[in-house]
């Protein structure tokens, strides 16, 4: 059996879990959680972290770019222009073309601004970025992002940091039927079962931060998320039994001796 790899841009990943680097009690805890998660890609908010603080306790000193693929993100950007400038800073700071694109439309809900997201995606793809946009769970938006050249679509499972899990799994399933690029659930995962459900639906990967960093024991939760993603992926590939209204005996009654 060929190895089950996640392809993003021109890179292949064994892990289908992408983790964040915010909200941890310390850089040491962040490092240990990333290691426990088994993730190979980590995302960092360019506008909220001083990547140049080398020697003073930089994230780069704890989570080595030689070991992990960094995915800079444009968190905190509210216009396409702002997101594009931030993406360019991320490319320069981390020497990568990967970008998790966020264009936020509302400060209270942190829902994406779809118009700004499409505009920024178009410009960043032209500039040679590997664009992974955080979007609503709307299949039409997902298709438009694919048509613009996005490397993946990242529909929210629920509002950022809410821990509500997948509020509309049916839309996620429709998105997977609509696009051919990877579908990565981003935002809303609160516990391991949420991650497993996303993977059992057939999603290509899950991205999370608060679900791990905000747990009482982030290291244990990171490992739980790793196992959940792996189990969900394996269950999807195995193919679940159909749901039925009535019971069906595990042992066939035909041929039984009375």
Image (cartoon, grey):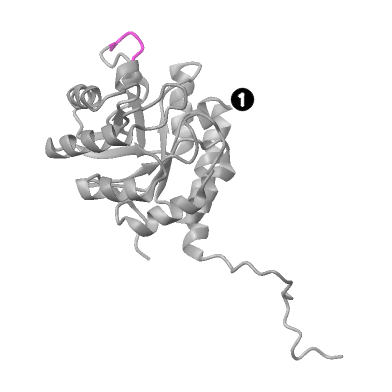
- List the residue tagged with mark 1: 216
Q: Quadrant of the C terminus?
A: bottom right
For the point 30% across and 18% down, the residue is 47
Span shown in magenta: 53-58
Residue 126 found in image quarter? top left
Q: Is residue 86 left or right of residue 198?
A: left
For the point 14% across and 38% down, the residue is 128
Compared to residue 220, the image places residue 10 above or below, namely below
Q: Residue furthest left?
A: 127
Residue 60 found in image quarter? top left
For the point 72% across and 75% down, the residue is 248
Q: Is residue 81 left or right of residue 100?
A: left
Q: Position of residue 156 (x, y in %)?
A: 44, 39
Q: Is residue 178 left or right of residue 123?
A: right
Q: Position of residue 74 (x, y in %)?
A: 30, 26
Q: Residues within 10 Å of mark 1 (few under 14, many from 20)?
A: few
Residue 226 located within the stretch drawn in magenta: no
Answer whether residue 15 is visible to the viewer in this image. no
Residue 55 located within the stretch drawn in magenta: yes
Tag 1 secondary structure: loop
Q: Which of 148/17 is in front? A: 148
Q: Position of residue 17 (x, y in %)?
A: 43, 42
Q: Position of residue 38 (x, y in %)?
A: 44, 39
């Amino acid at each position: 059996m060929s190895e089950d790899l996640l392809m993003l841009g021109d890179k292949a990943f064994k892990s289908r879990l992408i983790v964040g680097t915010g909200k941890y009690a310390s850089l040491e805890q962040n490092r240990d959680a990333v290691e426990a998660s088994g993730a190979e890609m980590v995302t960092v908010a360019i506008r909220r972290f001083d990547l140049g603080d080398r020697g003073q306790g930089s994230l780069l000193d704890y989570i080595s770019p030689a070991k992990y693929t960094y995915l800079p993100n444009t968190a905190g950007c509210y216009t396409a222009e702002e997101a594009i400038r931030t993406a360019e800073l991320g490319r320069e700071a981390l020497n990568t073309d990967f970008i998790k694109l966020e264009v936020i439309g509302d400060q209270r809900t942190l829902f994406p601004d779809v118009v700004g997201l499409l505009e920024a995606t178009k410009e960043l793809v032209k500039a040679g970025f590997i664009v992974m946009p955080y979007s609503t769970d709307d299949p039409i938006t997902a298709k438009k992002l694919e048509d613009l050249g996005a490397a993946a679509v990242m529909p929210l499972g629920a509002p950022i940091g809410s821990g509500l899990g997948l509020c509309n799994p049916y839309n996620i399933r429709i998105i997977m039927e609509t696009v051919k690029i990877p579908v990565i659930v981003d935002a809303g995962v609160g516990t391991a079962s949420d991650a497993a459900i996303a993977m059992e639906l057939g999603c290509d990967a899950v991205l999370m931060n608060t679900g791990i960093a905000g747990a009482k024991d982030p290291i244990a939760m990171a490992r739980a998320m790793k196992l959940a993603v792996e189990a969900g992926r394996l269950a999807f590939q195995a193919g679940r039994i159909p749901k039925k209204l009535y019971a069906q005996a595990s042992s066939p009654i035909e041929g039984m001796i009375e």
